[in-house]
């Protein structure tokens, strides 16, 4: 390593002062820390999601629920509908649980990593990020962008995910006592804009000199990743039942895939097995086509069956008739929004 650990942190912070991304949940370098609510909300939204995808959702949430107390008072149904399309829906359920816990504490977030970890849904990364960015605590914040920068800087040869403890320990050695939040955001920005997965812009990187991966001439070799396991392919069936310009929607159970979301009835498909349930109503059904969707651990091919004729009775179980012309307001998750688009498509 051609530079001391203190020199590395200074180089990173100097780069951040000049090149920090302007993001709606951030405070510019050198200004007062942002509202912890906005930091927490953005970090939850950003988990396994891109900045570009999150910006509009963040704006809608903060306009509708500008404080954690406002969010805590929102209905589950409204929050889940507002989250629709952002994916990883357990985050939305945890978001509400956490907001309500903070509201019960008077609307004040704990200001330490340990205190934040005690809140519902806050794992090690989110607690560290909020503690550093919102409260100035010295914590070690490691997301995918930081992993990439650190593994290249130190040429970590052990593959992910097993190398994560080593990566965190190395990140700890270069995290400064002061401005830890800016330092974490700086590494995130470097990973997103300079030390990118492909074609890293090493000549623009403040750490190009001490970077061992660059010295080896193969920065794209890092981080080393274990071979991917084959993703199972599942099949399922969804049902479109229409009456008087309204479609029958159900609310999925709070636990499991797409929990708590409005959806079309389906045949019980899951990550572990194909669907096998019967149609919710007797009568004739026509195929309207198929849609595909890729989840984290499996892919799904969903067939859509349309009930022929108007339903004379409500399907069994809890549900609601939703106006077809207002279906965009139902907050359907992407998978079922795709299926609904098939049902509503003009007949060729």
Image (tube, rainbow, N blue to C red):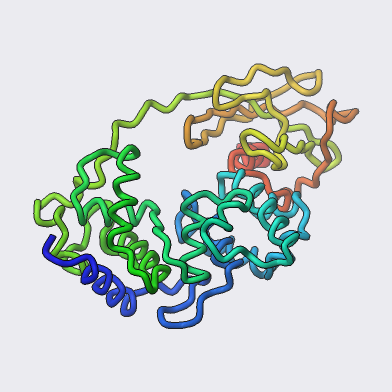
Counting labels gives 0
Residue 258, how many percent across, how many down?
Answer: 63, 39
Q: Residue at x 69, y 51 (%)?
A: 97
Q: For this rendering, which residue is in front, 137 or 215?
A: 137
Q: Residue at x 14, y 55 (%)?
A: 212
| Res 345 seen here | no
Q: Where 286 falls versus 68 (above or below)? A: above
Q: Residue at x 57, y 20 (%)?
A: 273
- Residue sitting at the far left: 216
Q: Where 28 falls versus 225 (above or below)? A: below
Residue 105, how many percent across, how many down?
Answer: 72, 62
| Res 75 seen here | yes
Left-right relation of 347 to 330: left
- Residue sitting at the far right: 313
Q: For this rendering, which residue is in front, 175 or 14?
A: 175
Residue 18, how many percent across, how many down?
Answer: 31, 79
Give the quadrant of the N terminus: bottom left
Left-right relation of 213 to 145: left
């Amino acid at each position: 390593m051609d530079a001391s650990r203190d020199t590395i942190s200074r180089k990173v912070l100097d780069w951040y002062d000049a090149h920090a991304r302007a993001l709606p949940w951030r405070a510019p370098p050198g200004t007062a820390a942002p509202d912890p609510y906005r930091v927490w909300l953005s970090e939850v939204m950003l988990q396994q999601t891109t900045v570009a995808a999150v910006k509009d959702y963040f704006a809608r949430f903060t306009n509708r629920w500008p404080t954690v107390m406002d969010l805590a008072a929102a209905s589950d149904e409204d929050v889940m509908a507002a989250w629709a399309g952002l994916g990883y829906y357990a985050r939305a359920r945890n978001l509400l649980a956490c907001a309500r816990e903070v509201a019960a504490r008077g609307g004040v977030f704990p200001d330490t990593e340990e205190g934040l970890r005690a809140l519902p849904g806050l794992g090690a990364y989110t607690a560290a990020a909020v503690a550093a960015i919102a409260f100035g605590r010295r914590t070690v914040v490691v997301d995918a962008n930081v992993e990439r920068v650190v593994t290249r800087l130190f040429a970590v040869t052990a593959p992910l995910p097993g190398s994560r403890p080593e990566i965190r320990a190395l990140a700890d050695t270069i995290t400064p006592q002061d401005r830890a939040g800016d330092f974490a955001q700086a590494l995130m920005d470097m990973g997103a804009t300079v030390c990118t997965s492909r074609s890293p812009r090493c000549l623009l990187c403040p750490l190009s000199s001490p970077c061992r991966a660059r010295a080896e001439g193969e920065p794209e070799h890092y981080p080393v990743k274990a071979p991917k396991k084959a993703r199972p392919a599942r099949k399922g069936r969804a049902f479109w039942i229409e009456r008087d310009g309204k479609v029958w929607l159900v609310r999925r159970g709070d636990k499991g895939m797409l929990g708590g979301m409005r959806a079309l009835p389906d045949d019980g498909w899951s990550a572990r097995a194909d669907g096998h349930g019967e149609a919710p109503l007797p009568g004739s059904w026509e195929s309207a086509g198929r849609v595909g969707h890729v989840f984290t651990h499996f892919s799904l091919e969903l067939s859509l069956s349309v009930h022929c004729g108007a339903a004379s009775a409500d399907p069994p179980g809890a549900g609601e008739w939703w106006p077809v012309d207002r279906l965009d307001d139902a907050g359907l998750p992407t998978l079922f929004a795709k299926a609904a688009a098939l049902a509503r498509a003009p007949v060729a």
